[in-house]
């Protein structure tokens, strides 16, 4: 898959079938769009393109308000590549934010990409101030002779899958439910940084991860996880919290990786959250903490609940 951010780069191909949207999370609804994208691209002999934004529009429209992302651009690209997308185009929202709905359709989709088919979700909006919707897009498609397909909402257990729903589920610690909405576990990428060495002191080493400012942190507690290191997956147990037994105050994410030996400092790893195990607890003694961690590790070893998710890389 090629990742592009200029119209000149995209001009290598003669025509595209394009899916439009934010695609944060690349969840089950987004995956349905991509499925339809691939079907239509093959029928029409076009390259398939996901057209989205390098920086989420809300960050530009509401710079003072935080928005936490389910996936980084790197994660989105990896998932889309696995789904067979030919091109991921990361638009600069500021270049198109003042275009009317018809200007965007004509000047960008037609003139820049020679679009032959457009795929959007039922709640898609576009054009200056969000003036256009899926119905308007279909009208423009009819006017210019371009096929437009609108994908209806995707339901999981009677709930419409959406990025906002998934954000709430992650924030509340319901990561096992998130599996069903994403088709894979929620994950956080980050570099391993130096911590307070508490794990080393008690003989159970942990990797402290620089969580950055944009990732959504699940609810404080202990989680059954997988951790990817150099494209290999290891079982792990991960704590999000302040380490109250050691009188900690700063929030941290640290993971104990089972059956791994080696130096992880400054290495980028990815932690996949499979299930919330328990609350973070302040123990009366270090020995009690160690006993609990050993119990958590055994629960992780016995857990086999994430084998049927094809996008769990």
Image (cartoon, grey):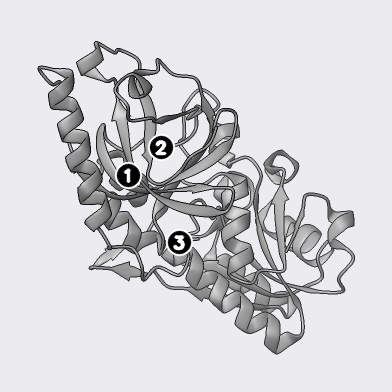
Q: Residues within 10 Å of mark 3 (few under 14, many from 20)?
A: some
* Residue shown at 56% from the left, 71% from the top: 34
Few, some or many residues within 10 Å of mark 1 (<14, 14–19, 20+): many
Give the Cα separation between the discs numbered 3 and 2: 19 Å
How far across and how far down the image is residue 221, in percent?
24, 34
Residue 135 seen anywhere in this rendered image of the structure: no
**Disc 3: which residue:** 312
Above or below, 127 against 97 in this view is below
Mark 2, secondary structure of its residue: loop
Cβ atoms under marks 3 and 2 closer than 8 Å: no
208 or 213: nearer the viewer = 208
> Foreground: 90 or 114?
90
For the residues bearing labels 2 and 1, Cβ distance under 8 angstroms:
yes
Q: Is 29 displayed left or right of 117 in the figure? A: left
Name the image quarter holding residue 250: top left
Q: Earlier in the sequence, mark 3 or mark 1?
A: 1
Q: Residue furthest left?
A: 284
> Which is more foreground, mark 3 or mark 1?
3
Looking at the image, residue 190 lies above or below residue 306: above
Residue 218 is situated, as x and y percent measured from the top left of the image, at 32, 38
Which badge, 3 or 2, comes first in the chain's sequence? 2
Q: Secondary structure at mark 1?
A: helix
The residue tagged 1 is 170
The N terminus sits in image quarter = bottom right
Q: Real-space Cα distance between discs 3 and 1?
A: 17 Å
Give whichever of discs 2 and 1 has the lower sequence position. 1
Residue with the mark numbered 2: 216
């Amino acid at each position: 898959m090629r990742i592009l951010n200029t119209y000149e780069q995209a001009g290598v191909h003669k025509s595209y079938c394009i899916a439009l949207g934010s695609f944060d999370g690349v969840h089950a609804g987004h995956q349905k769009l991509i499925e339809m994208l691939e079907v239509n691209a093959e029928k029409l002999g076009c390259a398939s393109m996901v057209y989205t934004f390098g920086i989420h529009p809300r960050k530009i429209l509401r710079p003072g308000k935080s928005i936490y992302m389910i996936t980084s651009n790197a994660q989105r690209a990896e998932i889309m590549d696995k789904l067979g997308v030919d091109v991921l185009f990361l638009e600069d929202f500021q270049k198109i934010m003042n275009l009317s709905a018809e200007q965007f359709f004509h000047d960008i989709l037609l003139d820049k990409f020679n679009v032959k088919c457009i795929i959007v979700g039922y709640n898609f909006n576009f054009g200056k101030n969000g003036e256009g919707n899926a119905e308007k897009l279909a009208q423009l498609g009819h006017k210019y002779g371009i096929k437009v397909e609108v994908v209806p909402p995707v339901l999981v257990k009677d709930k419409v899958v959406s990025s906002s729903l998934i954000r709430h589920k992650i924030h509340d610690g319901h990561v096992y439910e998130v599996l069903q909405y994403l088709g894979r576990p929620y994950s956080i990428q980050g570099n391993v940084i130096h911590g307070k060495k508490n794990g080393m002191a008690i003989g159970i080493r942990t990797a402290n991860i620089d969580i950055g400012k944009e990732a959504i942190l699940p609810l404080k507690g202990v989680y059954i996880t997988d951790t990817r290191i150099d494209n290999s997956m290891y079982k792990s147990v991960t704590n999000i919290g302040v380490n109250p037994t050691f009188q900690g105050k700063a929030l941290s994410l640290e993971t104990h990786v089972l059956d791994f030996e080696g130096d992880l400092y400054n290495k980028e790893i990815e932690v996949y959250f499979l299930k919330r195990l328990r609350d973070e607890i302040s123990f009366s003694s270090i020995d009690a903490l160690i006993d609990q961690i050993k119990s958590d590790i055994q629960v992780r070893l016995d857990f086999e609940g994430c084998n049927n998710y094809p996008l769990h890389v």
